[in-house]
Image (tube, grey):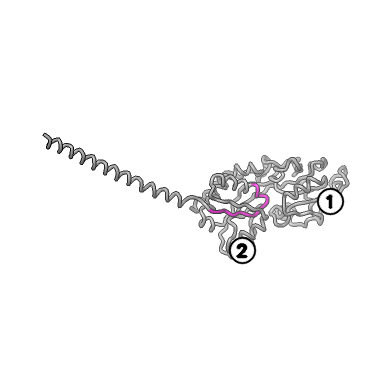
């Protein structure tokens, strides 16, 4: 009897040993894939920097975009500067250590495209929003709140023949107008000169500045000042400035997100322009964080545009850009 009990006990112990070994082996098998998966996650985690320069007009849009992106991707540093469109292209189109993106308030020029080709840099243009060229005046200026397109342009033309407010309307003050705007580093200056003024010279008295904040300050302190820049800067400084309502032929139109647009039915279309960011495609292919930021920018362009004083693009324009970027993966 004892021998039989001993045999049963040995069999039970043997079964337990086999069962334990099998369970232990299964646990080890499950741990190995988990370790591998963790390593893969670390390898694909986004990190590093994204460097952006260029347009002062586009700066509020891109600065807000960068802030939002870094809030979701803490290991990526997005640096946004605002040297101006033209100065930004000089930093973008270099053989080594160029910026990843250049923001622009006008389209790339032929000579800039030629330089990119010479350097072997593949450049891709993306429209990110629509902006309305806005003319701003001092809060105390209660006479020039409405002007025709022709009259407001004459103020800035050397051949315009307008030096005093009374030259526009004899009932207005016979005081000297102080025209102002961004300098030649900015695409807004070029848009004004090339498109609005049809490449005719600025009046000698125009005060052109590098910083938009300087223009806001100057106009806010001088009741005879008038300046031009993008709608976004006016929108964020409404407490200091007033915008001139422009009559394009069908009555005065106030610049706003509702009136800015490229379609003819948009009341402010004559002073509307697309704004851009330009991507170094090679950097997007080489650095995952650059491509990821580009996709994020286009996916969120509509929301950020409205938050920073820009009119949104049509959905099909956005989707076309996203499809192109997804194809770079």
Q: Secondary structure at mark 1?
A: loop
Q: Residues within 10 Å of mark 2 (few under 14, many from 20)?
A: some
What residue would you read off at disc 1?
162
Of residues 314 and 256, the one drawn nearer to the viewer in this rendering = 256
Q: Indicate yes or no whether the magenta region holds residue 106.
A: no
Q: Residues within 10 Å of mark 1 (few under 14, many from 20)?
A: many
Horizontal and vertical percent for residue 169?
Answer: 85, 44
Identify the mark at residue 128; answer none if there is no mark: none
* Mark 2 or 1: the one toward you: 2
Visible in this render: residue 227?
Answer: yes
Of residues 149 and 86, the one drawn nearer to the viewer in this rendering = 86
Q: Which quarter of the figure has residue 241?
A: top right
- Quarter of the image with the N terminus is top left
- In this picture, is 98 found above or below 296? below
Horizontal and vertical percent for residue 7?
Answer: 15, 38
Q: Which quarter of the figure has residue 203?
A: bottom right
What residue would you read off at disc 2?
115
Q: Residue furthest left?
A: 1
Q: Earlier in the sequence, mark 2 or mark 1?
A: 2
Visible in this render: residue 269?
Answer: no
Q: Is 43 on the left-hand or right-hand side of 225?
A: left
CA distance for labels 2 and 1: 40 Å
């Amino acid at each position: 009897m004892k021998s039989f009990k001993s045999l049963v006990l040995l069999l039970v112990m043997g079964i337990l040993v086999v069962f334990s070994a099998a369970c232990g082996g299964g646990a080890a098998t499950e741990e190995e894939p988990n370790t591998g998966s963790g390593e893969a996650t670390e390898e694909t985690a986004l990190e590093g920097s994204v460097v952006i320069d260029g347009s002062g007009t586009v700066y509020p849009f891109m600065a807000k975009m960068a802030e939002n992106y870094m809030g979701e991707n803490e290991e990526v540093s997005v640096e946004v500067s605002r040297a101006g469109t033209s100065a930004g292209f000089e930093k973008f189109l270099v053989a080594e250590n160029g910026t990843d993106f250049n923001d622009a308030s006008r389209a790339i020029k032929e000579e800039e495209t030629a330089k990119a080709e010479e350097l072997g840099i593949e450049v891709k243009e993306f429209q990110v929003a629509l902006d309305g060229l806005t003319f701003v005046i001092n809060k105390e200026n209660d006479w020039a709140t409405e002007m025709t397109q022709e009259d407001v342009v004459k103020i800035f033309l050397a051949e315009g023949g307008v030096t005093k407010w009374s030259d526009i309307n004899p009932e207005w003050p016979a005081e000297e107008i102080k025209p102002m705007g961004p300098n030649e580093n900015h695409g807004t200056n070029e848009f004004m000169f090339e498109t609005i003024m049809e490449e005719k010279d600025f009046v000698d008295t125009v005060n052109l500045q590098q910083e938009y904040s300087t223009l806001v300050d100057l106009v806010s302190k001088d009741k005879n000042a008038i300046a031009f820049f993008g709608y976004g800067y006016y929108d964020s400084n409404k407490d200091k400035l007033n915008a001139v309502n422009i009559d394009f032929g069908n009555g005065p139109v106030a610049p706003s997100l509702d009136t800015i647009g490229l379609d003819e039915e948009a009341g402010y279309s004559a002073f509307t322009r697309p704004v851009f960011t330009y991507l170094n495609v090679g950097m997007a292919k080489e650095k995952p964080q650059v491509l990821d930021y580009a996709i994020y920018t286009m996916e969120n362009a509509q929301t950020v545009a409205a938050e920073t004083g820009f009119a949104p693009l049509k959905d099909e324009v956005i989707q076309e850009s996203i499809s192109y970027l997804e194809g770079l993966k």
